[in-house]
């Protein structure tokens, strides 16, 4: 048969690691392989499956006389290599040998055969070059006519040229006068010419003279040096086993019977159908419903399911495939469960729509054929014209091709629900003739250990065959085993799908197999045949259980037959109970005061307070620890000795007992401490040497702050002059501050503001008298007050040393103010301010006055004003306003 190149395929997942191979002893004379993994030993199958089980490889009635397992028999292989004298690309005898014969070296033809139990290829005996390496080199002259020659004639010529080095008679083992395919494997290979021949074909050798007295009745597996090794193996399978090409069946790169001419480096294993009939490793025949875990290991178990009533001509083959680099499956196009449907009646059907071996794709579509791409029984009926010529709703899906290409497989061929393009988890397709199969592959997914399987690719499937069964499927939608979190001392509902996979109504108990100190409920359901539903099992974990992973089994078991049960294993993580922390403490505190930091600790499930939990509060780098009481509250006191501002409060409770760790946070604002600042010293002082003494007083809260962090600003605003003065000061530990005043004589208004980050308080105001001891006010003046009434001021005010003295009289109609004491006198140039106490109309009063001296004479220039308030209470008794003298003279100096 002629191999056609397959189209290029999309990206293929790759996984590292090497697949182990079963090896045996090697000798110089021959290579013998013993200890091949045999088919599983026969076991009694449950009713209704027969015992012993049928042999699905049916060696007594093969599909072709050659198509059967040859066991461990050594198969001599003769390789005849033809060079051309006009090509520079000829290779050596050793180059050819190394492509075929190193039997335990990955990537050779012989190693491919032995790795898949397809036979033990050993070098034929020959005397060319390096004797007995199985290779004979012949020269065919010019490449043009050599390659163009009829292939059977070219092979005949090669056999004739090889005859001097090969005793063909020794291979006529049945002594019938002919050397046949069953007696000698023969590969012919020639140097690829300018057309870069890279495929192969298996044909007979043209008739000719007997060689060594024997008729050449074998075919040869023909190829070129540009042909890849898997195509060479494919052609040898034709010669040795009469392998039937399944290109048109769409098997792609899932079987050696698929297209192989796809580049220089390509490997994929035979599928289960080929191995079943030709290899020693047989699939396990499933006779009871249940879970199994196929993997991509070369020695992993593979599976066959069938319906005993229908017979052995129809069955499904199930295995896991994975493109693992460095293995003979490194170029399969997908990862996951691969399922083939077999119809033994049609495994050699020439029709692409009648497929004896067909890949069951997850999406239900059929793999394209070679010439019938849409597999509708018509060839090339939808040419590339952007039209739906065949009326199937698709355009250009079955175009004529030259040369014809065959499908090499697709990266959505395998059943892998973790791939969102292939979410299907149930293969319940009918038999090839459309009859319901009554067997299925369900719950396709991954076992609980899949991600920790040391680079082995595992699947998990549930086989639903004839007879009773109960499916328990806790997996998620992607087929992954569940991994629930179970909380100490709590109850968790575990819900999963169940299905009666039997053929009659039955009653089942569903539960979880758990540790003896746990509890799990049991739910009993009666289910009709193939009825599916969900169950919910309540699992309670004790408070003192070990934290970490635990193995659980979801179980379904028939109440009428305890042998009908399914256990689905998965892991559950037992975790501590959640803990909540809620900050309930202060969010603001004055500097130097104590902040009560508190938090309530509660169980995260019941919300009950938790007693005895250590709680740590961290503020500004300080850690304070307390233990929660019966109310769940833990409280500490933090001295607010930091600068005012916002401070994060971190609250933590460590993992302990049945509870996990918990944390929360808050913000604590440190606010300035309240303070009162007042003038403590004299407010009447000689100008130039004055000092203002301040005293700070804190709140009486029992937690005084550091008054050395207190500052104040004193602003002096003049009455008689024009320049304001400012002084900044700090306080000592007792709260005392002394401000040295270099201010001139004036009546100053002192405004005192609290400054600094640590304290706050109201501003204070005071009147500061800075006097000139040489100042005086003398004379008498008359005029009209603001009401038009006649008033008179008579004064004689001055200082004796630093003490004011003198007399003052003020007359306003019938009322007279007579000074008793002079409090102070401030003279600045020709202006003066003074304050005296005395009597006004028989009432104790205070008089504050001003005088302005415009020179002599005093009338029409001098002026004065008085304001009289009661000593008791400070009520206003009289106010003159500005009085311009119209008589008299006031002398200010």
Image (spheres, rainbow, N blue to C red):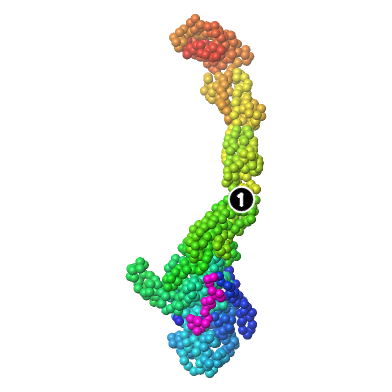
Q: Is residue 10 visible?
A: no
Q: Is residue 356 visible?
A: yes
Q: Where residue 201 appears, x then y in whole percent? A: 47, 82
Determine the residue located farthest toward the front in the rendered image.
560
Above or below, comparing residue 66 to residue 495 in the picture: below
Q: Tell which of 773 and 839 is nearer to you.
A: 839
**Residue beneath the point at 50% across and 11% down:** 878
Which part of the image, by quadrant, shows the N terminus? Answer: bottom left
* Residue linked to disc 1: 488
Left or right: 705 as drawn, with respect to 535: right
Q: Where residue 513 appears, x then y in whole percent? A: 60, 58
Q: Tell which of 843 and 283 is nearer to you.
A: 283
Above or below, comparing residue 389 to residue 513 in the picture: below
Above or below, comparing residue 537 to residue 101 in the picture: above
Above or below, comparing residue 689 to residue 122 in the picture: above
Q: Which residues are magenta?
A: 47-66
Q: Where residue 562 appears, x then y in whole percent? A: 57, 63
Dot 1 falls on a residue whose secondary structure is loop
Q: Where residue 259 appears, x then y in whole percent? A: 46, 76
């Amino acid at each position: 048969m002629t191999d056609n190149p397959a189209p290029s395929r999309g990206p293929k997942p790759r996984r590292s690691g090497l697949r182990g191979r079963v090896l045996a002893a090697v000798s110089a004379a021959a290579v013998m392989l013993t200890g091949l993994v045999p088919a599983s030993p026969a076991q009694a199958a449950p009713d209704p499956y027969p015992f012993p089980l049928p042999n699905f490889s049916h060696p007594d009635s093969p599909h072709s006389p050659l198509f059967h397992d040859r066991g461990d028999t050594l198969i001599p292989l003769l390789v005849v290599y033809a060079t051309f004298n006009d090509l520079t690309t000829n290779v050596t005898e050793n180059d050819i040998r190394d492509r075929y014969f190193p039997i335990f070296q990955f990537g050779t033809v012989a190693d491919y055969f032995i790795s898949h139990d397809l036979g033990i290829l050993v070098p034929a005996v020959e005397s060319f070059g390096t004797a007995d390496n199985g290779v004979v080199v012949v020269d065919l002259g010019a490449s043009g006519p050599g390659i163009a020659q009829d292939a059977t004639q070219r092979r005949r010529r090669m056999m004739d040229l090889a005859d001097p080095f090969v005793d063909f008679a020794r291979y006529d083992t049945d002594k019938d006068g002919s050397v046949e395919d069953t007696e000698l494997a023969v590969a012919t290979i020639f140097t690829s010419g300018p057309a870069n021949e890279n495929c192969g074909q298996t044909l007979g050798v043209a008739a000719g003279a007997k060689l060594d007295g024997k008729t050449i009745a074998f075919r040869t597996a023909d190829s070129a040096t540009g042909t890849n090794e898997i195509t060479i193996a494919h052609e040898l399978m034709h010669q040795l086993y009469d392998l039937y090409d399944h290109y048109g069946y769409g098997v792609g790169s899932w079987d050696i019977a698929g297209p192989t001419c796809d580049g220089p480096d390509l490997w994929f294993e035979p599928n289960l159908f080929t191995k079943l009939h030709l290899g020693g490793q047989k699939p396990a025949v499933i006779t009871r419903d249940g879970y199994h875990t196929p993997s991509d290991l070369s020695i992993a178990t593979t599976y066959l399911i069938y319906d005993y009533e229908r017979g052995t001509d129809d069955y499904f083959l199930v295995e896991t495939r994975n493109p693992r680099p460095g293995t003979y499956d490194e170029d399969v196009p997908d990862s996951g469960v691969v399922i083939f449907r077999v119809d033994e009646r049609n495994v050699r059907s020439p029709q692409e729509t009648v497929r004896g071996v067909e890949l069951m794709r997850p999406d239900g579509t059929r793999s394209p054929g070679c010439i019938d791409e849409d597999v509708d029984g018509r060839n090339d009926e939808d040419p590339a014209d952007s039209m739906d010529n065949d009326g199937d709703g698709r355009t250009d899906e079955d175009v004529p091709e030259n040369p014809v290409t065959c499908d090499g497989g697709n990266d959505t061929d395998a059943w892998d629900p973790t791939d969102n393009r292939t979410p299907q988890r149930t293969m319940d397709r009918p038999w090839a003739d459309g009859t319901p199969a009554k067997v299925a592959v369900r719950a396709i997914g991954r076992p609980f250990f899949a991600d920790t399987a040391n680079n082995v690719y595992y699947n998990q499937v549930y086989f639903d065959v004839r007879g009773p069964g109960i499916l328990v499927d806790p997996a998620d939608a992607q087929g992954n085993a569940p991994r629930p979190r179970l909380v100490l001392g709590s109850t968790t509902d575990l819900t999963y799908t169940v299905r009666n996979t039997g053929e009659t109504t039955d009653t089942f108990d569903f539960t979880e197999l758990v540790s003896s100190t746990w509890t799990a409920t049991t739910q009993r359901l009666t289910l009709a045949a193939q009825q599916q539903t969900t169950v919910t099992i309540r699992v309670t974990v004790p408070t003192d259980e070990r934290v970490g992973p635990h193995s659980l089994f979801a179980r379904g078991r028939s109440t009428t037959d305890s042998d009908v049960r399914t256990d689905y294993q998965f892991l559950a993580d037992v975790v501590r109970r959640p803990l909540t922390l809620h900050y309930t403490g202060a969010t603001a505190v004055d500097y130097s005061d104590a902040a009560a930091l508190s938090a309530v600790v509660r169980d995260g499930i019941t919300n009950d307070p938790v007693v005895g939990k250590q709680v740590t509060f961290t503020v500004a780098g300080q850690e304070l620890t307390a233990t929660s009481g019966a109310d769940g509250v833990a409280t500490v006191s933090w001295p607010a000795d930091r600068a005012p501002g916002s401070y994060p409060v971190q609250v933590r409770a460590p993992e302990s007992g049945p509870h996990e760790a918990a944390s929360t946070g808050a913000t604590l604002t440190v606010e300035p401490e309240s303070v009162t600042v007042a003038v403590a010293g004299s407010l009447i002082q000689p100008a130039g040497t004055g000092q203002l003494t301040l005293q700070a007083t804190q709140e009486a809260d029992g937690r005084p702050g550091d008054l050395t962090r207190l500052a104040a600003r004193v602003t002096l605003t003049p009455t008689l002059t024009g320049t304001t003065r400012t002084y900044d000061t700090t306080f000592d530990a007792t709260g005392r501050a002394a401000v040295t005043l270099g201010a001139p004589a004036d009546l100053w208004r002192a405004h005192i503001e609290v400054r600094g980050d640590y304290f706050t308080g109201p501003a204070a105001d005071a009147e500061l008298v800075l006097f000139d001891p040489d100042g005086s006010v003398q004379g008498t003046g008359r005029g009209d007050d603001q009401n038009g009434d006649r008033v008179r001021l008579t004064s004689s005010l001055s200082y004796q040393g630093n003490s004011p003295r003198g007399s003052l009289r003020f007359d306003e109609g019938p009322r007279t103010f007579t000074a008793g004491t002079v409090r102070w006198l401030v003279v600045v140039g020709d202006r003066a301010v003074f304050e005296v106490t005395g009597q006004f109309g028989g009432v104790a009063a205070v008089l504050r006055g001003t005088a302005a001296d415009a020179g002599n004479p005093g009338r029409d220039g001098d002026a004065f004003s008085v304001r009289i308030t009661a000593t008791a209470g400070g009520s206003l008794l009289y106010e003159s306003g500005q009085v311009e003298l119209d008589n008299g003279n006031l002398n200010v100096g």
